[in-house]
Amino acid sequence: MGQRLDLQTLLVDILGSKNVYFQPPPDIKMEYPCIVYHRDYAETSFADDYPYRHVKRYQVTVIDRNPDSDIPPKIAALQMCIFDRFFTSDNLNHDVYKLFF
């Protein structure tokens, strides 16, 4: 699995812009469409009581004014990614995914 900065680069490539935010502070002014992500879980596998695999999971949210955006399917196609939920807020569409990376 990759490092967080590798994930940042991947998300920027998918979005096609620099509007990718990792754990943004509440006072930041985001531009849309954008991707917001943060770590939300980690999974450790054990063998003989010793950890041999540790994978971080990220919550990745695509925020777009367009309800038919082509960005969410690109995120959904990533390896080890599952759709979590969809919601709207302030007339913005939010597609939320869980991604092990």
Image (spheres, helix red, strand yellow):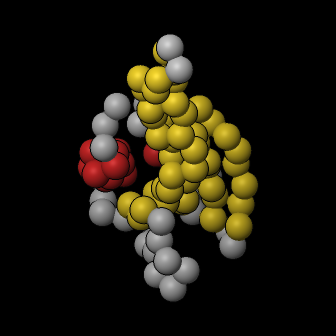
Work out whether residue 28 or residue 64 is closer to the camera in this orientation and state it: 28
Outermost residue toward the top?
Answer: 48
Image coordinates for residue 58, horizontal then vertical, percent? 51, 46
Q: Residue at x 38, y 60 (%)?
A: 20
Quadrant of the frame with the C terminus: top left
User: Relative to residue 24, is residue 97 drawn left or right?
Assistant: right
Quadrant for residue 7, please give it.
top left
Work out whether residue 38 or residue 11 is closer to the camera in this orientation and state it: 38
Work out whether residue 4 or residue 42 is closer to the camera in this orientation and state it: 42
Question: Does residue 55 sit above or below 23 in this rendering?
Answer: above
User: Relative to residue 10, is residue 83 drawn left or right?
Assistant: right
Work out whether residue 69 or residue 72 is closer to the camera in this orientation and state it: 72
Image coordinates for residue 28, horizontal then vertical, percent? 46, 81
Is residue 68 in view?
no
Outermost residue toward the front?
Answer: 49
Question: Does residue 65 sit above or below 96 in this rendering?
Answer: below
Image coordinates for residue 54, horizontal then vertical, percent? 44, 32
Image coordinates for residue 19, horizontal then vertical, percent? 37, 64
Question: Does residue 94 sit above or below 79 in this rendering?
Answer: below
